[in-house]
Image: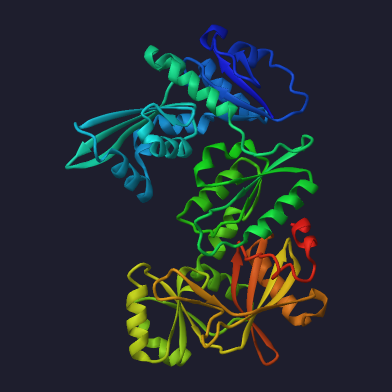
Amino acid sequence: MKHWLVVDRTVDWPTPLPGVEVITAEDFLSNPPSHDGERVRVYNLCRSLRYQSNGYHVSLLSGARGFSVVPDVATVQDLKSPTLARMISDDEAELIQRSLKTLHGQDFILSIYFGQGLAKRHEELARTLYNRSPTPLLRARFQKRDEHWELERLQALALEDVPEEHLQSLHEAAAQWFGKRRRAVAPPKPLPFDLAILVNPEDNCPPSDERALRLFEAAGERAGFSVDRIGHEDFGDLTEYDALFIRETTFVNHHTYRFARRAALEGMVVIDDPDSILRCTNKVYLAERLARAGIPMPETRIVTRGNLQELGAALGFPLVLKQPDSAFSRGVVKASNEEELKLEASRLLKSSDLLVAQAFQPTDFDWRVGVFAGKALYVCRYFMAPKHWQIIQHASDGNSMTEGKSETLPVEEAPKDLIRTAVRAANAMGDGLYGVDIKQVGNRYLVIEVNDNPSIEAGVEDAVIGKLLYQTI
C-alpha cells in the first residue's frame, strides 16, 4: 500500500517519513502521482477542510478515485455538527469520566494527533475518539457539569490550527504512526490483499480457539492475503484492509457491528456482514423471519408483559425463554411451571421489552450445520452438558462453563432433510457464514436458531474435512 500525505505546500511538512510520499493538494487534484494499481491511503493535512476548499476536494476525490482517505468527507461533515460529535456510547461516556476524574477546573482540551493524545495519560481516550471519527488532527473539548464530564465538541483540525508548540509532538506521533509494524515477522514476499481478523483475547467464549485462528491465518496467506489480527482499538485503521473476518462474539449495540457496518460501507468483503448480525443476533427477528419463510420450528411465541399469562396454555410446560440477544446459552432459561415462568420472565424483561418463548423439545444432542454461501460446509452433533438440558452449562459465578461432547459427520452422510432444512434457514438470513441449530424430533427437523459468527474450533467443526474448512472460507 502507498501512503500519501497531502499538504497545501511541501514546506508545511518538513519532516521526512519512511514509506510516505508528501505531495501538494494541487498536484493531487490535477496531476496525481502514479500508483500502478497499488492501493493508496491518503492522509489529508490541508490547511483548510471547509466546503469546496482544496482540502475538501482532496477527501472527496480520494473516494471517487478508490483511495482510502482520512478524514473522509462524511467524517468532516459529521464533525461540523456539534450534536453529532457529542453523540457518544455508554462505554465512551464511562471512559471520559474515568480518564478525566482527577482533573481540576471545569474545562479541558485534548489534542489528538494521528490517534495519540498530546496528554499521554489520556491515551486510551484519545484513541477511542480517533476511532469514532478517524482524522489525523483532532481536538476534543470537554466541560464539567455537576461533577460530570461531557464531550462538548469534537472537531477536525487543519494543519494551520495546530499550535507551534505542538508541532514536534505532531511529527513524533506521525513518525510512530507510520513506523509501527503490525506483524512480528514480515511475509517472505508481498501478498496482493490484506485481511483483518477481528478478535478479542478477553472473550471468555470466543467463536474460534487459538489453533483455529492460526489455521485461518495460514489459509488466508495461501489464498493471497497478508493477514493481521486486530482488536476493537484498531477501528480507525480498518480501511487499510481489503477484507474483514470477525472472529469475536457479535452483538448489534457493540463494536463488532460497527466494524462490520463500516467495512461494508467501504466496499470491503466482510464476514459477518452487518445485515447478518442484525438478523441473527435478535431472536425476535429470527423467529419472525423463519416463520415467514415457512421454516419448521418448535412452537414459538413473542413474549410481552401483556401476554405472559397465555404462554403456559399455548406452549405447555416446561418451556424455554430467550432474551433477544442471547448467545452461547446465556440469556436462555427453562421454566417448568407458572411460578418459574413469572420469576424468570420478570428478570429477563428488565433488560428487554420482548422475549421469545418456545416449546421445550428434550433431545440428547443438537444438530449444527455450518452453511457458507448457501452450501453446507460441516455437520456436527453437539451433545448436552452432563446432567443439563443445554450444550453449555455456565457456572453460577459466570466465570466457568461445562460443555457436552461433540461429534462431526461428513456432510454427505448426514440426513438429506436435515441439510435441506439448514440451507433453507440460512438462506433466509443471507449468503454469509452461519451455524444452524436444529432439533430432531422423530423424523422432523426443527430449527432452533441461525447463528452468525458460528463456532469453528480446531478438532471439532474441522474434524472431517480438516484444513479444507479454513481454505474454503
Q: Image height check: is 55 above or below 419?
A: above
Q: Image height check: is 299 above or below 325?
A: below
Numbered-mark total:
0
Q: Position of residue 74 (x, y in %)?
A: 50, 33
Quarter of the picture containing the C terminus is bottom right
- The quadrant holding residue 454 is bottom right
* Nearest to the observer: residue 378 or residue 421: 378
How has the structure been colored for display? Answer: rainbow
Q: In the visual, does 65 lie left or right of 6?
A: right
- The quadrant holding residue 310 is bottom left
* Nearest to the observer: residue 131 or residue 214: 214
Quarter of the picture containing the N terminus is top right
Res 463 visible: yes
Q: Position of residue 297 (x, y in %)?
A: 59, 81
Q: In the visual, does 165 lie left or right of 383?
A: left
Residue most extreme to the front: 184
Q: Position of residue 299 (x, y in %)?
A: 54, 85
- The quadrant holding residue 87 is top left
The residue positioned 42% from the left and 92% from the top of the image is 313
The residue positioned 66% from the left and 13% from the top of the image is 30
